[in-house]
Amino acid sequence: MRVGLIGAGTIGKYLLDELSGEDQDIRITSVFVRNLEKYQHLEKQYGVSLYTTVDDFLDSSIDVVVEAANVQAAKEVLPDIVSKKETVLISIGALAEETFFDEIVEIIKEKDHRIHLPSGAIGGLDLVENVTEAGVIDAVSLVTRKPAHTLLSEPTDETKVVFEGNAAEAIKQFPKNINVSIALALAGVGLRQTKVTLLADPNLDKNIHAIEVSGDFGTASFEIKNNPFPSNKNTSYLAAVSVLGTLKKLTKKINIG
Ligand SMILES: NC(=O)C1=CN([C@@H]2O[C@H](COP(=O)(O)OP(=O)(O)OC[C@H]3O[C@@H](n4cnc5c(N)ncnc54)[C@H](O)[C@@H]3O)[C@@H](O)[C@H]2O)C=CC1
Ligand SMILES: O=C([O-])CC(=O)C(=O)O
């Protein structure tokens, strides 16, 4: 499977490290960048071709596109990508606006393409999706706790609630920090019904996501204590791992969950 990558930052570089080389079943062959000079070294290092226009990138010989840029970039390029390719989207917040979501769904239905949303820095989405499809879910909440300096510009001595509301509002205010809430919302009861609390904790060096689900099926609680990437404290290591996992699932004959 030949993969086209958008965004060669923390997650993108992790994927390049894992998925380059002739002998790989899944291999990144094309990378879309804005600044050719800055990323030129990737060509030699990973044997990839760089593209600066979306059209050329999509016309290169790739089977699937992985977006690992950011919510705004994803929104800009998503209609073009999904109309031509299968897509793995990690900036899931790009799908938070209802009209845009509907537009994308219309395109993928017409083109018979799929979008794959990795579980990112959380887990348990299979359960949430199952109980939602079966109509046996009542409520979902997410409490995210992050190192204070990744959320606040000023230092703080005590834990601060920086957001309390629903997933739709959370991603508008924190597009770089709470993509997980949109994955949870899309798997479950929707953006307005998914409760989100975001805490800035000065004594923390991990990104912790606590999920509570309840309904006729029973209750479920998940807590994911994520180690951040050393090079990017905003991003959990698991987020990158989940993109790799999603790509590997695309090639498997037995799917779990
Ligand atoms: N669903 C989840 O659990 C998580 C989702 N994310 C999403 O993944 C994204 C990527 O994360 P990281 O790799 O840690 O971020 P990063 O900031 O390290 O890397 C992003 C890269 O994308 C590039 N970029 C930005 N706009 C672009 C454009 N229009 N075209 C091409 N490249 C562009 C940047 O230059 C940078 O190299 C985040 O912005 C966030 O939206 C991140 C963590 C968790
Ligand atoms: O990496 C994380 O823990 C979560 C994150 O940034 C996001 O959901 O956007």
Image (cartoon, rainbow, N blue to C red):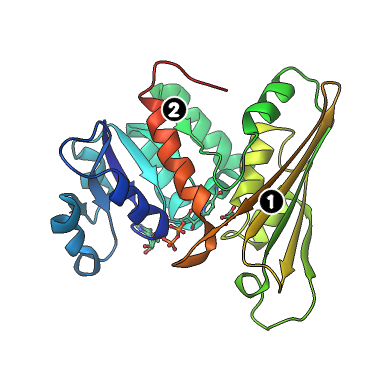
Q: Residue at x 56, y 57 (%)?
A: 227
Count how many numbered circles sit on residues in the image: 2
Q: Is residue 8 left or right of residue 41?
A: right
- Mark 1–mark 2 Cα distance, whole angstroms, equals 27 Å
Res. 114 mark: 2
Q: Is residue 7 above or below residue 78?
A: below
Res. 154 mark: none
Q: Is residue 74 left or right of residue 35?
A: right
Instruction: Say what secondary structure mark 2 lies in.
Output: loop
* Residue 144 falls in image quadrant: bottom right
Q: Amino acid at mark 1?
A: His
Instruction: Say what secondary structure mark 1 lies in.
Output: strand
* Residue 178: x %, y % from top left: 63, 54
Q: Is residue 160 above or below residue 171?
A: below
Q: Residue at x 51, y 38 (%)?
A: 118
Q: Is residue 149 left or right of residue 74?
A: right
Q: Is residue 130 left or right of residue 84?
A: right
Q: Residue at x 34, y 39 (%)?
A: 65
Q: Quadrant of ligand 2?
A: bottom right
Q: Amino acid at mark 2?
A: Arg
* Residue 128: x %, y % from top left: 70, 30
Crowding near the residue tagged with mark 1, few <14, some 14–19, many ≥20 C-alpha atoms within 10 Å: many
Q: Is residue 43 visible?
A: yes
Crowding near the residue tagged with mark 2, few <14, some 14–19, many ≥20 C-alpha atoms within 10 Å: some
Disc 2 residue lies near ligand 1 with CB under 8 A: no
Residue under numbered circle 1? 209
Q: Nearer the viewer, residue 54 or 12?
A: 12
* Residue 210: x %, y % from top left: 73, 48
Q: Residue at x 63, y 44 (%)?
A: 182
Disc 1 residue lies near ligand 2 with CB under 8 A: yes
Q: Is residue 16 above or below residue 234?
A: above
* Residue 151: x %, y % from top left: 65, 70
